[in-house]
Image: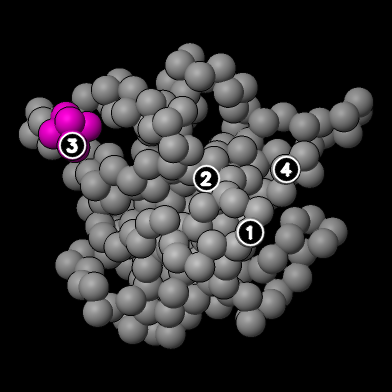
């Protein structure tokens, strides 16, 4: 309860990002995940919403499963469409800059050795979903911390499209430990290899930005490929 009160006070005091980084770091140590209702400055959130909403259909590509050589499309697993963020666009650069500060803030606080960050816009059309998965498998990935930022004004419970998080127990839990509404401005941060999660089908268009902080897993001369 106390933490919730602190969060509300923080929001009222116009978002000091260092305090937000404190909250995220503390939650990662305590539970491994956190949901913040209004993490970024509202002007940045609004600009990102206008950006994704302005994209023509051709801008998006079908999302796949697996990386590099193992990449494949699988519409039974996920049906969202994505577009990678780039520093070329000032609005996207603003988001990436905030995440860069979070990267440095978490390295300072938790010595996580986060090396870089990659993120894509995601668009789930009516009925689209992403079946239960983990973003990283222990020991075989360089994605260590996942972020999801939502861009959906006025999302109602009945709209579906929830992010369901499951516990890290080896036995698959029946009940999710969290049901997250993809409401405009909410940011979810979680340890990538700890929490199986899924996106339930939505009954309206659903916008988000999914991203991953990575550690550098380069070996010898082989540069670790992004994405
Ligand atoms: O949009 C969400 O709520 C989660 C998306 C996700 O799990 C992913 O892109 O890996
Ligand atoms: Fe995921």
Residue 127 seen in this snapshot: yes
Q: Are the residues at dot 2 and dot 1 in contact (C-beta closer than 8 Å)?
A: no
4 vs 1, front mark? 1
Which residue, given by chain and number where applicable, does mark 3 sit on?
1
Q: How is the image coloured?
A: one colour
Of labels 2 and 1, earlier in sequence is 2
3 vs 1, front mark? 1
Q: Are the residues at dot 2 and dot 4 in contact (C-beta closer than 8 Å)?
A: no
Label 2 lies in ligand 2 vicinity (Cβ under 8 Å): yes
Q: Secondary structure at mark 2?
A: strand
Q: Are the residues at dot 3 and dot 2 in contact (C-beta closer than 8 Å)?
A: no
The numbered disc on residue 138 is 4
Q: Classify 10 Å Cα crowding around label 2: few (below 14), some (14-19), many (20 and above).
A: many
Name the image quarter holding the N terminus: top left
Of labels 4 and 3, earlier in sequence is 3
Which residue, given by chain and number where applicable, does mark 2 sit on?
146
Which residue, given by chain and number where applicable, does mark 1 sit on?
171
Among the 4 quarters of the image, the one containing residue 14: top left
- On screen, residue 70 versus residue 65, left or right, reads right
- On screen, residue 50 versus residue 174, left or right, reads left
Q: Secondary structure at mark 3?
A: loop
Residue span colored magenta: 1-7
Residue drawn 82% across the image and 62% down it: 70
Q: Are the residues at dot 4 and dot 1 in contact (C-beta closer than 8 Å)?
A: no
Measured along the vertical axis of the image, is residue 116 above or below residue 71?
Answer: above
- On screen, residue 109 versus residue 114, left or right, reads left
| Mark pair 4, 3: CA separation | 33 Å
Q: Classify 10 Å Cα crowding around label 3: few (below 14), some (14-19), many (20 and above).
A: few
């Amino acid at each position: 309860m106390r933490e919730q009160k602190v969060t509300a006070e923080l929001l009222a005091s116009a978002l000091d990002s260092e305090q937000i980084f404190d909250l995220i770091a503390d939650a990662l140590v305590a539970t491994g995940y956190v949901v913040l209702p209004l993490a970024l400055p509202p002007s940045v959130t609004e600009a990102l919403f206008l950006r994704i909403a302005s994209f023509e259909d051709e801008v998006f590509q079908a999302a796949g499963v697996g990386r590099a050589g193992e990449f494949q499309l699988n519409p039974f697993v996920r049906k969202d469409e994505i577009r990678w963020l780039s520093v070329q666009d000032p609005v996207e650069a603003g988001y990436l800059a905030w995440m860069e500060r979070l990267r440095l803030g978490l390295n300072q606080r938790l010595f996580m050795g986060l090396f870089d960050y990659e993120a894509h816009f995601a668009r789930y059309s009516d009925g689209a979903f992403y079946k239960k998965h983990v973003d990283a498998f222990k020991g075989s990935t360089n994605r260590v911390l996942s972020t999801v930022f939502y861009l959906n004004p006025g999302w109602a419970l009945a709209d579906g499209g929830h992010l369901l998080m499951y516990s890290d127990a080896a036995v698959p839990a029946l009940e999710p430990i969290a049901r997250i509404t993809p409401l405009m401005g909410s940011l979810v941060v979680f340890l990538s290899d700890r929490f199986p999660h899924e996106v339930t089908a939505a009954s309206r268009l659903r916008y988000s930005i999914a991203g991953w902080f990575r550690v550098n897993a380069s070996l010898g001369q082989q540069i670790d490929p992004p994405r």
